[in-house]
Image (cartoon, coloured by chain):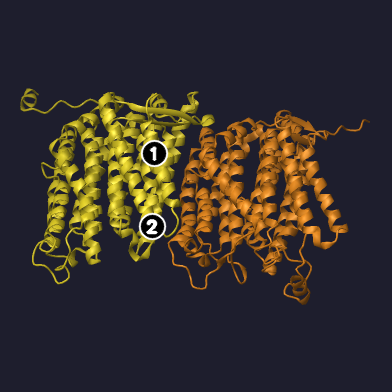
Amino acid sequence: MNFPWLTTLIAVPLLGAALTALVPRGLELAAKRLALFIAVITAIIALVAAVAFVGEGQPEQFVEQYEWVGSLGVFYAVGANGVSLSLIVLTAVVTPIVLLAMWREAEAERRNPKPFFALVLLLEAMIIGTFAAQDVLLFYVLFEAMLVPMYFLIGLYGGPQRRYAAVKFLLYNLLGGLIMLAAVIGLYVQSVNAGQPSFLLADLVALEVPVDIQRWLFLGFMFAFAIKAPLWPFHTWLPDAAAESTPANAAYLSGVMDKVGTFGMIALVLPLFPDATREFAPVVVVLAVISIVYGALLAVGQTDMKRLIAYTSISHFGFIVLGIFALTSQGVAGSTLYMVNHGLSTVALFVIVGFLIVRRGSRLVADYGGVAQPAPILAGSLLFAGLSGLALPGLATFVSEFLVLVGTYSRYRAAGVVATVGIILAALYILLFYQRTMTGPAREATRDFPDLRRREILVVAPLVALLLAVGFFPKPLLDVIDDGVRPTLVEVGVSDPEPITPAAEGSE
Amino acid sequence: MNAPTIEYGELLPMLIVFGAAIIGVLIEAFVPRPPRHLLQVGLALVALIAAFVAVIWLAGTSLVGAAGSVAIDGPALFLQGAILVLAAISVLFFAERRLEGGGDAFAPSASALPGGAAERTLVTAGVLQTEVYPLTMFAIGGMLLFPAANDLLTLFVALEVLSLPLYLLAGMARRRRLLSQEAALKYFLLGAFSSAFFLFGAALIYGFAGSVQLSDIDVALGTRVGQEGLLLAGVGLIAVGLLFKVSAAPFHSWTPDVYQGAPTPVTGFMAACTKVAAFGAMLRIFYVSFGAVSSDWQPMFWAVAVLTMMVGVVVALTQTDVKRMLAYSSIAHAGFILTGMVAADAIGTASVLFYLVVYGFTTVGAFAVVTLVRDSAGEATHLAKWAGLGKRSPLVAATFALFLLAFAGIPLTSGFVGKLVVFSAAIDAGAVLLVIVGVVASAIAAFFYIRVIVLMFFTEPAPDGPTVAVPSLWTTVGIGLGVAATIILGIVPGPMLELAQQAATFVR
């Protein structure tokens, strides 16, 4: 009997959320400690599971399957491949960091921090569940249900416009989810007509869905994932949600939770609708390129630090989607690695900006300046996070961005060329941001900025370490991801285009 | 001429309830006032439980009895069971006396002039009106008969038996009595009007088929040709009568006024049980009698379903009163149920049966929560007064939020599974466009449900806001059952779904 790793990874935070919620009033510190403890335990379990996964060496592991609603063919089925495992580990590792970043911030304005810690754990369980789900309805249920805790996290702990942002977040995502529900049912009815009602991903992949139906179902799924990811022009909820959330929550939202959208594209859309994917790929590629350039341009012009990072995320999600729909092994593997790296670097950017905001009480870039003098460690870590955001070679994001561009260029040359503009713009928005806030003479208001405290260093240090580690030695992670990606591309029925070499072009 | 045989055993649930109603009338006549309340509540609950036990004992029966006028089969027993449980919960809410300081939700004497001296005397003396219990039992008896009636005349009798007591009950609110009496009158006039439609339709069908028995009508469809005008006019008129009872657009205009004016426990009872019974009757008559001409009536139900969903959700957006909002929401849900009904097959039947149970539990629970939020003028139903309820009384607000999320169809609540099954049934029957409208309507509906949650949790409480009364055990148990059903049917819907599927065959 194999150890049920994935169920454990879902159950531990779920249980932790319940226990945290049950801690009596007045013991907020104990509740926070308990939640952090659970999150750390979950992260350790995830790391141990990853080691076990690599040790085993099979592409598909940790499979568990139990009947859930027999009459509809719904299963509690979980399993992991390289793609899902790396995202599960990302989620488990980032959660304690986010909790620690919220240690004091959750109590601002005398709010009760307990619900925050309980809801983040609940969210963690749901996110891990979606990454592990091998049943389309299970995926869908968690995909939709996770909106509720995030909605409360934004609405209860955010800034002055939090109600507006929370409702906008929820309605956008709910609309996407409901359209997807119609497509999920449509797909299920295909399996009913085939005589074997089932929501199991493997059964549904095995179905021969006619192309015209595939197109509609593809659009239904992609609508939800494009909103979640978010892809231009479905992105407008993210800047509001990120700007109005607390920074740590924004980090969790765009760093971890939104990955469910891009993960859904790889894990569901590609294998379920291969014909439609091939047909629509050029359209999605165009949208992705627009996202890259548009997000980067708007990031340059932002005056609000959190909105700025939100727009950089839109640009980066553009890269991720681009890599996926380039339908090359480098592209998809690069995108998966990008999801992990973007998670790390965005979380780092958001939490460091959060530390800035706590010190000054303002989200505006213009209110800062010369922070590097009084707080060198803070400035240094912001620079580091920023550089990883602009994909400096040697840092984690470089490897993934490079892979995505290589993978795209071999199939969509124009898209690959235009997307590189995003890299230049990234340097612009990050360095301008750093220059305006950190360099120059210290201002009146920023002169006495305390540097990072012990807890804050504890938050930033693991992120820095991970970004460096993946940047210099991406091979182990990339190997695992490659094993996960390969079967998907076989399912879509595409093979990598021949590399373009001068000799080959000359022979034509 | 032989006397017809009556299957007393199979009719036992109805006989128990009607018997209890008659005993209740006798208690009113002969028992002194002080012990009446306890006696009536006890009698009602015992009878409802006994009838429920009888329904379980009858499970699996499938016969046409009482000289062809009553069908005891899967759908009938399933719905009878649902009605009995929901009615028992409603009776618990009727029995609540702590909220009004010793009184209950009903006027001490419906005949005393509102605001007059007689009324004040009765209120000061603490007089309780106990006629509501026998009236309720008669209504429940009618509801049990309605989905089991197997000829048009029995259907009409059942319709009147369930409606007449409800007209009275609607006018008996303790507070805001003029509003309540207006509601009762409106309900009565429009209800009588719709009954006339039904009767006219039944007469036309009799003219067409030469019989009022549902199975004879079905036979006549195959043999009579050239009288389609009579048939279709009859089908249309009968549909008007039934659609009025389920409050489908364009026959819904009574719903908000009556739901608002009626005493809230009665509103919950009406909203849940009447809808269950009326949909049961509609299923039987359209599937058994008119199943062969389903292509003729399906377009009508398409149109009605689209209109009902859209009117329900769009008008609900503008409501400022909780009860009116819930009324429009119940209209929208009638539309969702109609979506399942247009499938016109066993899958459709099962989905409607399941949805009715889900909807019933959530509805009685939600209306019961409304009775708890009070200020000096009784229930504080204006939405503005619910601001900040989450801070003042987290448990009540969380309960209401759960019911709203279930109405909105968020996964892991019962409402999601309900939507899933009705939409699956509709897509399976080819009604894809209807499902897309349903999905869009769900998204719009989510907006006004979410708005209430925003109001409760993310808004500062008003200084002169209402208090949340602590109810007695009756209401607590009732709401607890609603919460339990909402969660359990959301997480483990399997057994109930299977029950609905097994029950989905009509006897002919």
Residue type at mark 2 is Glu
* N-terminal-most mark, 1 or 2: 1
The image quarter containing residue A331 is: top left
Checking the image for residue A28, the label placed there is 2
Q: Position of residue A118 (x, y in %)?
A: 40, 50
Q: Is residue B178 above or below residue A178?
A: below
Q: Quadrant of the C terminus of chain B?
A: top right
Which residue corresponds to the image point at 16% horizontal and 57% vertical from the top-left?
A378
| Residue toward you, A237 or A499 | A237
* Three-letter code for the amino acid on which mark 1 is drawn: Ile
Q: Are marks 1 and 2 in contact (CB under 8 Å)?
A: no
Q: Position of residue B208 (x, y in %)?
A: 76, 37
> How many C-alpha atoms fall within 10 Å of the one at disc 1: few (<14), some, or many (≥20)?
many
Left or right relative to A74: residue B17: right
Who's yellow, chain-wise? A
Q: Secondary structure at mark 2?
A: helix
Q: Are marks 1 and 2 on the same chain?
A: yes
Q: Residue A426 versus residue A215: which sits nearer the camera? A: A426
Q: Colour of chain B?
A: orange
